[in-house]
Amino acid sequence: MANGDEDVEWEFDGNPACPLCGPLAGTTDSRPIPPPHENCQCTNVPRCNNQYAVPFGDTTHFGPGNKCVVFTAEIIVTCWDGTEIGATVPIDFGCEGADEDEGWWDLLWSAIADEAAALEAGCVDCLLVA
C-alpha cells in the first residue's frame, strides 16, 4: 500500500496528556501524521475505508394472504484496495405483520449492514499491508 491511498485514512493515536500530541489525537489524514516532537512514541493507525452499495433489491410476497415477505438484496462491497465482493442475499421478514411493521425500512438496512459487514470480512486488511 502506498502512503496516500485515498481509501486508507491514517489516524494519529496521540497521548492526550502530552501538550504537543494531545491536540493531534484522533486527527486523520490521507498520509501518516509526522511526530510533533523528538522522542515521540505516538503512532498512526491505518483505517480501511471499505464501502458497500445495494444497486438492486426485489421484494417477494408469498404465503397466506401474501403476508410473508422476503427482500432479496444485491450487495457489493468495495474494499479499500478497489477489489469488490458481491452477494445476492435474501432477507426474510417472516409472515407475521411483516407488511405492517412501520420500522421495516430500519430493519431492512440493519440486516443489509450486517450482511455487508460479513462480506467486508473478505477484504484484505489494510493493517496487514500498511
Image: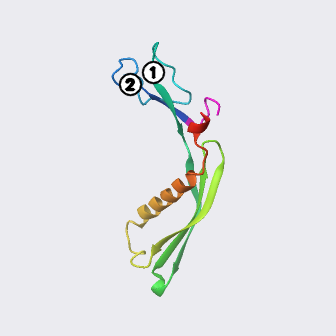
Name the image quarter holding residue 24.
Answer: top left
Q: Which residue has dot 2 on it? A: 15
**CB-based contact (under 8 Å), mark 2 and mark 1:** yes
Q: On the rendered structure, is 98 left or right of 85?
A: left
Q: On the rendered structure, is 4 left or right of 94?
A: right
Q: Looking at the image, is 60 positioned above or below residue 16?
A: below
User: Looking at the image, which residue sits at the far bottom?
Assistant: 64
Tell me the kind of residue under disc 2. Asn
Magenta residues (range): 1-8
User: Residue 6: within the magenta?
Assistant: yes
Name the image quarter holding residue 102.
Answer: bottom left
Query: Overall secondary structure of the magenta stretch?
Result: loop
Q: CA distance from mark 2 to mark 1?
A: 9 Å
Image position, residue 59 (x, y; %): 54, 72
Image position, residue 75 (x, y; %): 58, 59
Sequence-wise, which precedes: disc 2 or disc 1? Answer: 2
Q: Quadrant of the N terminus?
A: top right
Tell me the kind of residue under disc 1. Gln
* Disc 1 element: loop
Q: Which residue has dot 1 on it? A: 41
Please tell me which residue lies in front, 86 or 105. 86
User: Is residue 7 among what the camera can see?
Assistant: no
Residue at 51 percent of width and 20 percent of height: 34
Q: On the rendered structure, is 24 left or right of 129?
A: left
Residue at 42 percent of width and 64 percent of height: 107
Residue at 45 percent of width and 59 percent of height: 110
